[in-house]
Amino acid sequence: MKRINEYKKLFQIENEIDLASLKLTYRKLVKQWHPDKFQDGDPLKEEANIMGRQVTDGYHFLVSIAPETKEANLDEYRKTIMECGIADFKHKGLLLEITFTDGATYEYFGVNANVYKKLINSDKQVRFAKRFIYESYLYRKSKKAIEEGNYE
């Protein structure tokens, strides 16, 4: 959740993410922080490199959790959560990452330790996840899955 809030603040998003306005803000920020605008030796050039990476990462992250993106990929997501078992999962902070038997990996944001403990102690983890995780938390297809080629 911290990462979501940081990126929303960077892109000046107060409510729901709108892809059109996100894209406009992204272009403005890229122009503002492009490293080629600064001379070699200028202390702002290094800051521009860092901010440029942060802007690009934030843009891709926010696009992945935008309602329009989720809606476009809803059929694929529902097929995965209804037909596949859980191959693996990891929990760190408030982030739960679930890898499914079809190879898809999703990140769920805001999953606290109590819910995670209930998941790992459940005798039917898939059923528990269907009831209490899949539709209850903000999610996105993991970048790791995209990089491994599991996401078109």
Image (cartoon, rainbow, N blue to C red):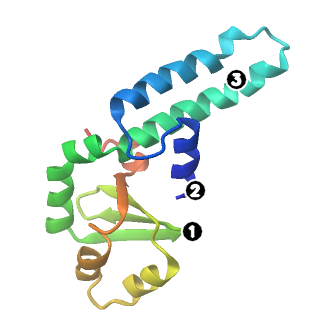
- Give coordinates of residue 10: x percent, y percent: 58, 37
Left or right of 2 on screen, residue 129: left
- Determine the image quadrant of residue 88: bottom left
Q: Which residue is mark 3?
A: 48
Mark 3 and 2 residues: CB-CB less than 8 Å, in contact?
no
- Give coordinates of residue 49: x percent, y percent: 68, 25
Q: For the point 32% across and 41% down, which residue is it?
A: 149
Quadrant of the snapshot with the C terminus = top left
Which mark sits nearer the N-terminus, 3 or 2?
2
Which mark sits nearer the N-terminus, 1 or 3?
3
- Give coordinates of residue 56: x percent, y percent: 52, 31
Crowd rating for badge 1 (residues with CA inside 10 Å; few <14, some 14–19, many 20+): few
Mark 1 and 2 residues: CB-CB less than 8 Å, in contact?
yes
Name the secondary structure under disc 2: helix
Instruction: Kindly report the distance in space between the C-alpha atoms of the residues bearing marks 1 and 3.
Output: 29 Å
Q: Which residue is mark 2?
A: 2
Q: What amino acid type should be assigned to the residue bearing mark 3?
A: Ala
Q: Which residue is mark 1?
A: 93
Crowd rating for badge 2 (residues with CA inside 10 Å; few <14, some 14–19, many 20+): few
Q: For the point 36% across and 49% down, which residue is it?
A: 145
